[in-house]
Amino acid sequence: MYIPKYFQMTDQVQIREVIEEYSFATLISQYMGSPYATHLPLYVDAEMKNIYGHFARANPQWKDIEQQTVLVIFQGPHCYISPTWYETKHAVPTWNYVTVHVTGKLEIITDEQLIEENLIKLVDKYEGLSSNYAMKEVDDDYLAGLNKGIQSFKVNIQTIEAKAKLSQNHPQERQKSVIQKLEERDKRFDRDIATLMKRNLTTP
């Protein structure tokens, strides 16, 4: 990924926040010699060493994917930036966004206990602490039948690249003007980008 120095994210806490918050990601590999992508809910372990998830077994992508170096894209918030928000006519439209790219070797998981553990962790992540749903309470036979329809995997993380394009290449007064305009718009990603821009302005 092309990352100019002033857009590079290096704060590991912020990078993890993007991975956790925008964890419905895109996993890209080669299948039969061509690029192939699947959109998947994923989770990362506490040490940021492995990413876990599963394919539908009917999805052919997994069949020749083991030990490939795959790319996983966690796409954060993004929005249009109008040049009319600046105090100058010497400007063009652009797009602000946050994204994290992870590469690593994919390993197919066949151990039934590990498959079940990974499913429980994935469901717990998305259900949240307040949910009364628990995978452990699902009928074993029913769950075993469902498990036959998935292929569990983990990605052993090799590299993490993170980019936050938040108008850092503009003067602070112009950044503040963009924040104000974004906050006036009734769109979630606009507000999310405004929040990130404000945090970036206050970061030493």
Image (cartoon, helix red, strand yellow):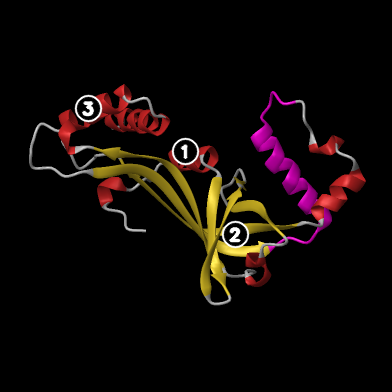
Among the two numbered marks 1 and 3 on one chain, the one whose residue lies closer to the N terminus: 1
Q: Is 120 left, or right, of 203 in this rendering?
A: right
Question: In the image, what residue occupies the spot 37% across and 58% down?
Answer: 1
- Circle 2: element type: strand
* Start-end of magenta stretch: 108-131
Q: Give the label on residue 13, or none.
A: 1
Among the two numbered marks 3 and 2 on one chain, the one whose residue lies closer to the N terminus: 2
Q: Main secondary structure of the magenta part?
A: helix
Q: Give the label on residue 76, or none.
A: none
Residue sitting nearer the eye, 117 or 96 = 96
Task: Return the x and y of residue 83 as percentages of the image width and height.
Answer: 17, 38
Tag nearer the camera, 3 or 2: 3
Q: Residue 2 appears in which quarter of the rendering?
A: bottom left
* Residue 122 inside the magenta-drawn segment: yes
Q: Amino acid at mark 3?
A: Lys
Question: From what the image shows, is residue 11 above or below residue 64?
Answer: above
Question: In the image, what residue occupies the spot 68% across and 42% down?
Answer: 122
Q: Give the label on residue 156, or none.
A: 2
The residue wearing badge 3 is: 176
Q: Residue 130 appears in which quarter of the rendering?
A: top right
Task: Return the x and y of residue 78 as percentages of the image width and height.
Answer: 37, 40
Question: In the image, what residue occupies the spot 21% across and 32% down?
Answer: 175
User: Which quadrant, please, contains the C terminus?
Assistant: top left
- Circle 3: element type: helix
Question: In the image, what residue occupies the spot 82% across and 57% down?
Answer: 148
Among the two numbered marks 2 and 1 on one chain, the one whose residue lies closer to the N terminus: 1
Tag nearer the camera, 1 or 3: 3
Question: From what the image shows, is residue 144 above or below residue 46?
Answer: below
Q: Is 102 left, or right, of 84 in this rendering?
A: right
Residue sitting nearer the eye, 99 or 189 = 189
